[in-house]
Image (cartoon, helix red, strand yellow):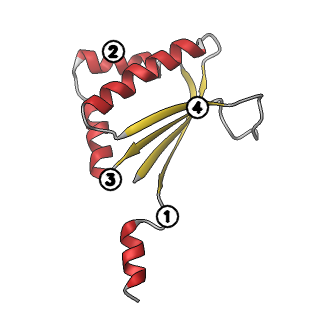
Amino acid sequence: MNRYIAMIDLKQEAKALAFASAVDAWMTHLQNAGTIRSWRLTRQKLNLAADRFRDFIIEIEVDDLAQLDKAFRLAGTHDEDVATLHRAVHDLIAEIDFALYRDYPDPERAERMALL
């Protein structure tokens, strides 16, 4: 399992509920297209976080990097519906940081370690 993490701060004028709705529409589209396994949106609570953490986190789970590549390819298509869904999220974002994580030890590494 791989997790693509996005830490996000919204633009000053952006509304949090509008952002959540736009994320839901975009992630649901990606999930229905089979390009992601699951996702969730979380928001910082009580402003309890170090300065380097952002207000929102989107966590996207994919089976493997091939599936993640399909999600990126879908996002890059010239389909107007896809562009509208993506833009509805992207246009509300002021700052964003990304990371890619995997379960550890992952099944491949655990199997190699068991052979020793």
Q: Looking at the rendering, in which quadrant would you find the N terminus?
A: bottom left
Reading the image, the residue beneath label 3 is 64
The image quadrant of residue 27 is: top left
Residue 34, given in percent of the width and then of the height, sits at 25, 36
Q: Residue at x 65, y 29 (%)?
A: 55
Q: Is residue 87 above or below residue 108?
A: above
Q: Residue at x 40, y 82 (%)?
A: 114
Q: Which element type, helix, strand or loop, lies under badge 3?
A: loop
Reading the image, the residue beneath label 2 is 84
Give left or right: position of 10 versus 46: left
For marks 4 and 1, the one nearer the N-term is 4
Rounded to the nearest angstrom, the CA distance separating label 2 from label 1 is 36 Å
Q: Residue at x 37, y 86 (%)?
A: 115
Q: Which element type, helix, strand or loop, lies under badge 4?
A: strand
Three-letter residue code for mark 4: Thr
> Mark 4–mark 1 contact, CB under 8 Å?
no
> Mark 1–mark 3 contact, CB under 8 Å?
no
Q: Looking at the rendering, in which quadrant would you find the C terminus?
A: bottom left
Reading the image, the residue beneath label 4 is 42
Q: Which mark is residue 93?
A: none
Rounded to the nearest angstrom, the CA distance separating label 4 from label 3 is 23 Å
Rounded to the nearest angstrom, the CA distance separating label 3 from label 2 is 26 Å
Give left or right: position of 86 versus 70: right
Reading the image, the residue beneath label 1 is 104
Residue 41, given in percent of the width and then of the height, sits at 53, 30
Rounded to the nearest angstrom, the CA distance separating label 1 from label 3 is 14 Å
